[in-house]
Image (cartoon, coloured by chain):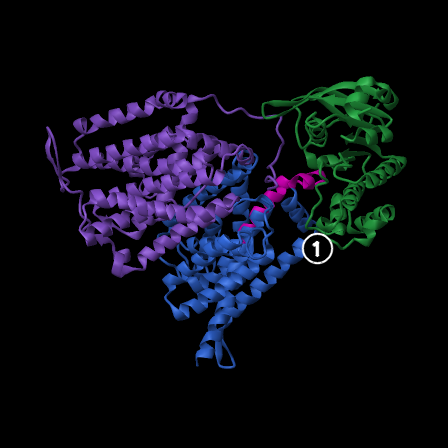
Chain colours: A green, B purple, C blue
Amino acid sequence: MPLLSLERISSYYGDARALADVSLEVGDGEIVAVIGSNGAGKTTMLRTISGLIHPRAGRICFEGAAIERMQAHHLIRRGIAHVPEGRRLFAQMTVRENLLMGAYGAPSWKERAALIDEVCALFPRLQERIGQLAGTLSGGERQMLATARALMARPRLLMLDEPSLGLAPKIVETILAIIQDVNRRGVAVLLVEQNVQLALKAAARAYLLESGAVVKSGMTAQFLADETVRQSYLGI
Amino acid sequence: MVLRTEAWRRHGVIVAILGLLCFVPLLVHNPYLLHLFILSMLYAMLAGSWNLINGYAGIFTFGHQAFFGLGAYASALLAMHAGLSPWITLWFAGCVAALAGLAIGLPVLRIRSVAHVAIVTLAFAVIVQAVVANLPDFTRGTLGLAGIPSFTAFALPGIGIVSFGAGDQVAYYYVALVFLALSMAFMIWLVSGRTGLALKAIRDAEEAADSLGVDPTRYKLIAFVASSFVAGVAGAYYAHYLHILTPDSAIGVSIMVTILVMTLVGGIGTTIGPLVGAFVVTFGLEAMRGLGDYRLMVYGLLLVLFVTFAPNGLAQLRRARPQRHRGEAQGPKPPPKK
Amino acid sequence: MLTQLVIAQIVNGIVVGSMYALFASGLTLIWGTMKMLNFAHGEFFMLAGYLVYFCYAVLSIDPALATVIAVVVVFLLGVVVERTVIHHLLSRPVWQFTTIIATLGTSIILQNLALHLWGPEFQNVPYFVEGMLNLFGIRIAYQRLLILGVSCASIMALWFILKHTRLGLALRATAQDADAAQLYGVNILSIYTLTFGLSAALAALAAAMLAPITAVNPYMGLSPLLKGFVVVILGGLGSFGGAIVGGVLLGVVESLGVLFSSTEWSDVIAFTFLVLVIWIRPWGLFGVEERS
């Protein structure tokens, strides 16, 4: 049984249909990429999974349980962490406070402190900036913090929405390393990206979304071999 | 222009209502009822002018009573001290109010936050009320400015002399009707033409409108000034109809609340809304006179009920019920990051 | 002699200002988390005033207990109002406007209910503590010192909650990014309700302290509400520290103003000052500049 499965999900913004019959799977410990151009529905899909939007049709199963009707704030406890588009850090809070928010659901302050130590071991740069306001960090540091915040919740599934957005290519390489590192620790990753090269480098499987529908899915090797993908998305 | 003829067609109901109002004094002779009709028409003008900036331009002001009051006092004082006919001072009053509209509009239009605009416009009205109340040498303050002259009589061919003395309520009625019709025509003209389109575009998507070359500030300012002009004229009429003014009756917050209730009940953002709302609320509250103290509570209740269940007012009843968006994001939307 | 008078007025101003600060911090709390204006805030103040009047002046209940009762009851009232009137409006379009209307309507209902039940007369509430302190020739009533003490304590308590508790973290997170707060487990709908109740409780506390000084009547909430808005905008909407500074500043300016002109003009001065500040610096003295 896959860790996460979407079965024929349709989501709407008002009367406009943003997702049409989308089906998708993420297995335990897998890295799955979702690519597609702007407005294809990638962000909507993640927001539907994390409960910020309720789908009008379809099912979402996580670890066997149906979650499509659940409220957003319950899902993090179930093990789904969503790093939204644009990072959405708490800009007027310090790095430390942002991390604490990641562990909002933790049972005690002691636990939270321990988690901070753990996560800062992964991201020493954040330890340096622990007292700084999140809004003053550089782009790469912000992405690090956003990811670290998500990891504070000890998720089973980490969903990243365009982590490379606005970042220099060298930093994007670091992001790739972080994703792979996180995955090695047993966290499944659902990676939404416009940067197709990054997505296909990181993931084992991929889905291509166009106008709210899945038009192609399979192993990344297949994607790289596909002519249309190469021309439209890779510019080769 | 295609838009304008369509507009006249759509506004057929308004024309019909105005037409019907012509016949009321022939059927209704009770002076108190006629008084209610006059008040309704006055409020229709006032609420309609408020609706222009709020319902159409999307700027939610809470100090509209200031323009009404400034117009009232300006016309009254000018007529009393300069000996001019109210027919003339009325237009001056409109201009005074329009200038005030310009003065308050310029800073307000730079503010994007609804909350700031609400508070600043409210503060402005409170300032105006306090200033008027605290200049007793000039305005008689809270004691009230009495002895305001009536409209001067004039001769109409076929009807003879039309005077505005104590028993001439019918004359007042028709003057109010004429002003109502003029103000509605003015606002319909404004809303159906380029300004109206621009305002709607600005209300719905300001950045998009801006990028298309529509200067938001210019159009909003036009709406502001037009709106305050009409409010000022309504105030001036009020002064020469009642012959007495106090800061509370002419500039009090209760006027703003009444405008809100009427426009909400009738339908924000529609031309007919304030018109219908004014009559419904005035006569409705009158019908509830038996409730005594509870009447004002009904005002409050109306505000809450309408804003919750029928935000588009009575005008909504003609359209389909608003769809419930089940696929929408749950919970309050965070404010747009502007 | 004049210096002593001025100093006495400044002290008075700080005392009253600290209550404005408490009242205004309630408004700014709601604004910060929910981005809405609560026009019924003055009525929470008024109802608490009546509760203290009935408990202490009429039933002779211990003033501290009377204060607690007022605060708790008004807190619950705030929760009820939020759940019934505000809640469903927040997820609908133009909520910034509809919430103003809804709270305005609620304010009218509550005000007229009070008027109907208890009449328009001013009701006097005796001082909680009698006596005056004489410090370098300046006489300060113990009641006023009590007010100052209570407001300092409450403001520090609030600050502590906001900075050092899980709840405070959730409140600040919701204020900064409601979506992200939800994603990390904050039940923002509960936060909204709690915030509203807490805000009402703050107004109630201010009323309990001020009631002996200003007397209780159905309209007592109007003036504080308007001044509260002035303070909140001056200090910057959403800035807790700004509300505190703004409140004290308004209190002092008002008190000094009374020395040099009549009370009616002091309102005008306060509001004109407000309009000017907004003109020059729309986001207030401590507010966060809105990127437009």
Look at the magenta stretch and give its main secondary structure: helix
Q: Chain of mark 1?
A: C
Q: Is residue B133 above or below residue B323?
A: below
**Which of the image's four quarters has the C terminus of chain B?**
top right
Q: Give the quadrant of residue B297.
A: top left
Q: Give the quadrant of residue C264.
A: bottom left
Q: Position of residue C249 (x, y in %)?
A: 52, 63
According to the picture, the residue beneath numbered tag 1 turns out to be C164
**Which of the image's four quarters has the N terminus of chain B?**
top left
Q: Position of residue A182 (x, y in %)?
A: 86, 38
Q: How many marks?
A: 1
Q: Residue furthest right?
A: A184
Q: Position of residue A185 (x, y in %)?
A: 89, 37
Instruction: Tell me if B114 is positioned left or right of B133 in this view.
Output: right
Residue segment shown in magenta: C178-203
Q: Residue at x 48, y 23 (%)?
A: B321
Q: Position of residue A64 (x, y in %)?
A: 79, 25
Nearest the camera: B5 or C195? B5
Residue C143 appears anywhere in the view: no
Q: Residue at x 72, y 51 (%)?
A: A136
Q: Give the quadrant of residue C190.
A: top right
The amino acid sitting under disc 1 is: His
Instruction: Tell me if C158 is positioned left or right of A78 in this view.
Output: left
Nearest the camera: C68 or C138? C138
- Whether the magenta-drawn stretch holds residue B239 is answered as no
Residue B175 appears anywhere in the view: yes
Instruction: Tell me if B254 is positioned left or right of A94 in this view.
Output: left
As helix, strand or loop, the secondary structure at mark 1 comes to helix
Nearest the camera: A215 or C266? A215
Using a 10 Å C-alpha cutoff, classify the residue at mark 1 as few (fewer than 14 neighbours), some (14 to 19) or many (20 or more).
few
Q: Residue at x 39, y 55 (%)?
A: C217
- Whether the magenta-drawn stretch holds residue C190 is answered as yes
